Amino acid sequence: MFSDYTLALAALACWGLLVLALSGLSLRGRTPENRTESGLPKRNYAEPSYRAYRAYANAMESSPPFMAGLLACIMLGAAPFWVNGLAAVFILSRIAMAYIHIATENQAARSGAYGIGWLCMLALGLIALISAITG
């Protein structure tokens, strides 16, 4: 049953690895001067360590809807073409977003990459819902 979703499952594994990488990157460059009393970076998008922290936080915020939609699609046997394709596009958009977020201050490009990933999550959720209803 799962062999039809090899690409989607690989994307899920890549997502886990990306989140772990972002976790490590979010700790780099923190100094007493650029941290709040709680230890979090001070809000400053000009500072790469803050952008890395935000990239990690955003990935954590996106994890539940991506994983829920993807796993629901797989468990319901939704069309593998769409599930695999949307999962792959999501991962590519989030890799691009992480790079843009950490390496630049380009808000428009970051928002564009985020929007592509968001649309993929929305589509996965809708496909899962339709698959559940039509059974």
Image: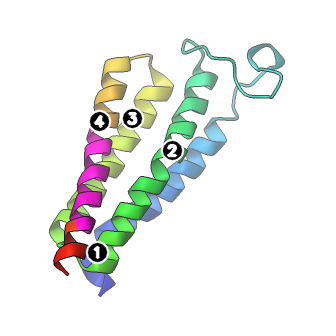
Q: Position of residue 7 (x, y in %)?
A: 30, 68
Q: Position of residue 88 (x, y in %)?
A: 28, 56
Using the image, determine if residue 33 lies above or below residue 60. above
Front disc: 1 or 2: 2
Which residue is identified by label 3? 97
Q: Report the side of 57 relative to 30 (left or right).
A: left
Q: Residues within 10 Å of mark 4 (few under 14, many from 20)?
A: some
The three-letter amino acid code for the residue at tag 3 is Met
Q: Earlier in the sequence, mark 1 or mark 4?
A: 1
Q: CA distance from mark 1 to mark 4?
A: 24 Å
Label 1–label 4 contact, CB within 8 A: no
Count up the numbered dots. 4
Which residue is identified by label 2? 61
Q: Residues within 10 Å of mark 2 (few under 14, many from 20)?
A: few
Q: CA distance from mark 2 to mark 3?
A: 14 Å
Q: CA distance from mark 3 to mark 4?
A: 10 Å
What secondary structure prevails in the magenta region?
helix
| Start-end of magenta stretch | 116-129
Q: Position of residue 105 (x, y in %)?
A: 44, 16
Which residue is identified by label 4? 115
Q: Earlier in the sequence, mark 2 or mark 4?
A: 2
Which residue is identified by label 1? 5
Q: Earlier in the sequence, mark 3 or mark 4?
A: 3
